[in-house]
Amino acid sequence: MARPRKKQTEKLSKHLPPARCTETELREILAKSKAANMTLSAYIRSASVRSKIVVKKSKWDPQLYSEIRRIGVNVNQAMRLAHSHGTSPKGLERVWERLQLLLEEMMRDGA
C-alpha cells in the first residue's frame, strides 16, 4: 500500500533565499540543529516561525534615513569628481561632514 499523499499546505515545495553568516554562526546553527535532533532546514524553519523578533523603535523615519543616505551618495560622487579634477568646492566638504555626522547619529539611535 502506498504512503498517503500530503495536503498541498503540508508540502515543502518552496525555497528560501540563501542566507549569509560567519563560520562561527554556521557552526553554532548546525550544533543547535543537531542538539534538537532536527535537520538544518527543519531547524531554520522552526526558529524562523516560532522566534519572537523585537522591533526596535527609532525616532528617525526610515524613509528620511534612506533619502539622507542617497544625498550622501550624490555628494560623495560630486566630491570624487571634484578631486579628480584637482579642485575642492568649499561648501561641498562641509555638507559631506554634516551628512556623515547626521547619519552616524541616526545609526546610534537605531534608524
Image (cartoon, helix red, strand yellow):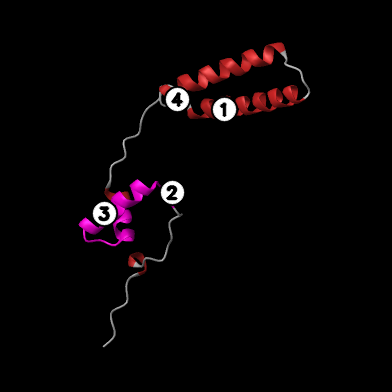
Residue 70 horizontal/vertical position (percent): 60, 29
Instruction: Tell me which amino acid carries mark 3.
Output: Ala
- Neighbours of disc 2 within 10 Å: few (<14), some (14-19), many (20+): few
Q: Are marks 3 and 2 in contact (CB under 8 Å)?
A: no
- Neighbours of disc 3 within 10 Å: few (<14), some (14-19), many (20+): few
- Neighbours of disc 4 within 10 Å: few (<14), some (14-19), many (20+): few
At 76% from the left and 17% from the top, the residue drawn is 87
Residue 18 lies in quadrant: bottom left
Tell me if 40 is positioned left or right of 63 in this view: left
Q: Are marks 1 and 2 in contact (CB under 8 Å)?
A: no
Say what secondary structure mark 1 lies in.
helix
The residue labelled by disc 2 is 20
Say what secondary structure mark 4 lies in.
helix
CA gap, disc 1 to disc 4? 11 Å
Residue 12 lies in quadrant: bottom left
CA gap, disc 4 to disc 3? 33 Å
Residue farthest right in this picture: 85
CA gap, disc 2 to disc 4? 22 Å
The residue labelled by disc 1 is 69
Q: Nearer the viewer, residue 51 or 81?
A: 81
Instruction: Tell me which amino acid carries mark 1.
Output: Arg
- Which callout, 1 or 4, points at the residue further toward the start of the chain? 1
Please check the rendered image and state whether residue 42 is part of the magenta-colored stretch, yes or no: yes
Highlighted magenta segment, given as a residue range: 19-47
Residue farthest bottom in this picture: 1
- Which callout, 2 or 4, points at the residue further toward the start of the chain? 2
Q: How many marks?
A: 4
Instruction: Tell me which amino acid carries mark 2.
Output: Arg
CA gap, disc 3 to disc 2? 17 Å
The residue labelled by disc 3 is 31
Q: Is residue 1 above or below residue 52?
A: below
In front of the other: label 4 or label 3? 3
